[in-house]
Image (cartoon, grey):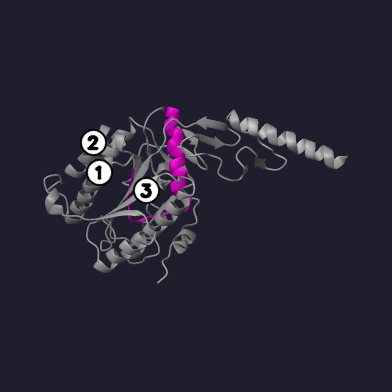
Amino acid sequence: MKIQKSNKKNFFKKIFIKICRLLNFEIIDQSEFTIPTLKKRLDENLSTTGKKSITLPMGEIKITRQINSLNIIFRFCTNVKMLTQSKQRLFEEEKNQYTLRSLNSILRSIQSAKNNFRYLDIKITAIDSGSDDADVQKIKKMIEEKSINFEYVKLDLDELKDFIDPLASTNQKSNMGNIYKSFEIGRDGNYDLLYFLEDDYIHEQNSLSEMLFSYEKFSSLIKDELILCPTDFPYLYNKFEPTEIILGNNRHWRVIEETLCTFLTSKRLLLKYWDTFISMTKTENLPFEKPLHEIYSKQYCLSPIPSLAMHCTNINSVYGLSPVMDWKKLWDENKLND
């Protein structure tokens, strides 16, 4: 009799789960630590790309802003150690180590994101502003081995001389030209989201998934485009000030008004503020990113707590190493096998 009761109970449970799925409801079995309608455990990712964002115990948010494609525009130079400083970076390695580990980290993060965003068209556009040929070949091989849509661009500053501040230093001209080229690629391409990425950011493996899920969630909530920075910069904690915090997918996100030149946004927003974006390359502002900050006064910009990426600068720089982060572990995890 006990077996019959158990079978009867399981039968009605299965019927109930099917009805909930048809009605687009989710149910939680907290004794089993599962969500039967999703066939997932509570400690797994519960969100569904392009459809719903689920964060326990906050519940479900319908996604109205689905992401269609992503172009990761990777600006790199393996020969210049630091653009405007003479100090050594953390770990005091050659510059190509930072470039290669940065790329390796984003490739690992792409592979992880593909498990959730199976339909997403992801491309890497690598813009080289002066690297050794051996390093370039390594970079091409790393990307091609992952079967990712890839384009290599060799920066030609002569083509961009009309757009770059003639009074800037040689290294800064190269940086400004690289930034302009990345914006131009974003403008002329057909990709929905654009991740403008410098070659000294080493990412957590879940970084892209968290950024993409959170972008869908936040843009659905505010009914607008926005900007996401992957790094929790220490200089944002220099003073007491009002702070707005919201839950992303698996991170808290903080509204900020300043970033450096690595950030994710949409092509729509790039076109909306095109003149402001490219003004970074026409005049050397103080701070350099001042035009970006002007945009952030009009559009939401958020950064994660804790950080999703480590900006590899000198250990004493307030513009680099994020707090509450295992820098050495992340560095070691992304070492390339010779």
Q: Residues within 10 Å of mark 2 (few under 14, many from 20)?
A: some
- Report which residue position mark 3 lands on: 122
Q: Nearer the viewer, residue 102 or 311?
A: 102
- Amino acid on which the number 3 mark rests in the picture: Ile
- Amino acid on which the number 1 mark rests in the picture: Phe
Say if the magenta span includes residue 93.
no
Q: Which mark is residue 183?
A: 1
- Amino acid on which the number 2 mark rests in the picture: Trp
Question: Of marks 3 and 2, which one's residue comes earlier in the chain?
Answer: 3
Question: Of marks 2 and 1, which one's residue comes earlier in the chain?
Answer: 1
Please provide percent x and percent y for residue 141: 33, 64
Please provide percent x and percent y for residue 167: 13, 48
Could one spot residue 243 in this view of the protein? no
Residue numbers of the magenta segment: 194-222
The reply to whether discs 2 and 1 touch (Cβ–Cβ < 8 Å) is yes
Question: Of marks 3 and 1, which one's residue comes earlier in the chain?
Answer: 3
Quarter of the image containing the C terminus?
bottom left
- Report which residue position mark 2 lands on: 274
**Secondary structure type for disc 3:** strand
Q: Nearer the viewer, residue 36 or 184?
A: 36
Instruction: Please give the count of numbered marks on the rendered protein.
Output: 3
Furthest residue to the right?
1
Query: Label 2 vs label 1: CA separation?
Result: 9 Å
Q: Is residue 156 above or below residue 186?
A: below
Identify the residue at horizontal 63%, vertical 31% (top origin): 20
Q: Is residue 182 left or right of residue 20?
A: left
**Secondary structure type for disc 2:** helix
Q: Is residue 16 left or right of residue 133?
A: right
